[in-house]
Structure formats: structure tokens, C-alpha cells
Amino acid sequence: MSIDKVKRELERLDKDPDWYTIKQKDSSTFRCHKDDRWKAFWAYWMECCERDSVREERPPVPPLLRAVAGAVDPYHAMKTLFPEWPARDPHCAMEYDALLQGELVPTTWALGACDEWGDDDEG
């Protein structure tokens, strides 16, 4: 595949409403399909909640979350991905304030939730 063909294909993706682009601080461009939003935010949040509650290690951070943190303008990246944000937050396994500052800081509200559940609590 020629470099010109690759450039044309990338330009086509930039105009496709099902694909999002996020300009990165390192001058690169991150591209993702609209369906990737829910995998990176909601599905990852669910997996982290489950693991955090029993104090297991979290899975690796999805590339899309890394792209938002590494964006030239993380706020604009979030508005691009979720136009209704911040009025309606998608569930996120990272602290929003930190994410908007370019940092990936895990939320910990589910951490250890199962610590006090014992086998003897069965009714």
C-alpha cells in the first residue's frame, strides 16, 4: 500500500462520523471507532469495580483512556467522545479531574468492598 493511499484512507476516517480523532500532545493523532467508547469507559469501569472490590490487580488501561489523558485538550476529547458530558458522565475507572489534567488516577470507591463479606454471612 502506498503512502498516498494510506493518507487518503486516514483523511476518509477523519470525515466519517463513526470515527473519532483525538490530537495528542506528541503531535500524533489517535483514532477510534464510536463503539470503542463504551469498551474503554463502561466495560473497563465494570471490570475494575469487580477487581477492586476483591483487591485484585486491574487490567491494563485501554488505549482510548490513555489517548484522552494524552490529548492536547482532554476536555475537548471528552466532549468529542461524549457530547452530553459533563452533564451525563460515562462511568469511568479514572478520576475525571486527573484525567482532564492528563493523568490516569484510578477511582477507588469500590476498593475492598468485599473485605467484610465472610462465608459465615450466608443466611
Image: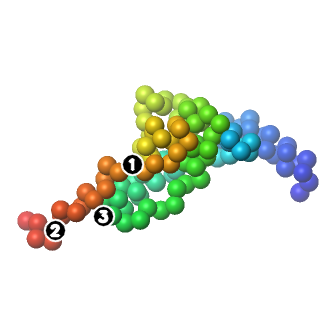
Residue at 41% over, 65% down? 57
Horizontally, is 63 left or right of 95 in the view? Answer: right
Residue at 52% over, 37% down? 100
Q: CA distance from mark 2 to mark 3?
A: 12 Å
Nearer the observer, 18 or 94: 94
Sooner in the amino-acid sequence: mark 2 or mark 3: 3
What residue would you read off at disc 3? 54
Horizontally, is 66 left or right of 22 in the view? Answer: left
What residue would you read off at disc 2? 118
Sooner in the amino-acid sequence: mark 2 or mark 1: 1
Instruction: Sort mark 3 into few (<14), some (14-19) or many (20+) by Cα contacts within 10 Å.
Output: some
Q: Give the residue type at disc 1.
A: Thr
Quadrant including the C terminus: bottom left
x, y percentage for residue 113? 25, 57
* Image position of 17 with respect to 4: above or below: above
- State the image quarter where residue 47 is shown: bottom left
Horizontally, is 80 left or right of 97 in the view? Answer: right
The color scheme shown is: rainbow
Q: Give the residue type at disc 2.
A: Gly
Dot 3 falls on a residue whose secondary structure is loop
x, y percentage for residue 92? 44, 45
Nearer the observer, 105 or 51: 105
Q: What label does residue 107 carry, if any?
A: 1
Q: Give the residue type at disc 3.
A: Val
Residue lying at the far bottom in this picture: please name it: 119
* Image position of 83 with respect to 48: above or below: above
Instruction: Sort mark 2 into few (<14), some (14-19) or many (20+) by Cα contacts within 10 Å.
Output: few
Instruction: Sort mark 1 into few (<14), some (14-19) or many (20+) by Cα contacts within 10 Å.
Output: some
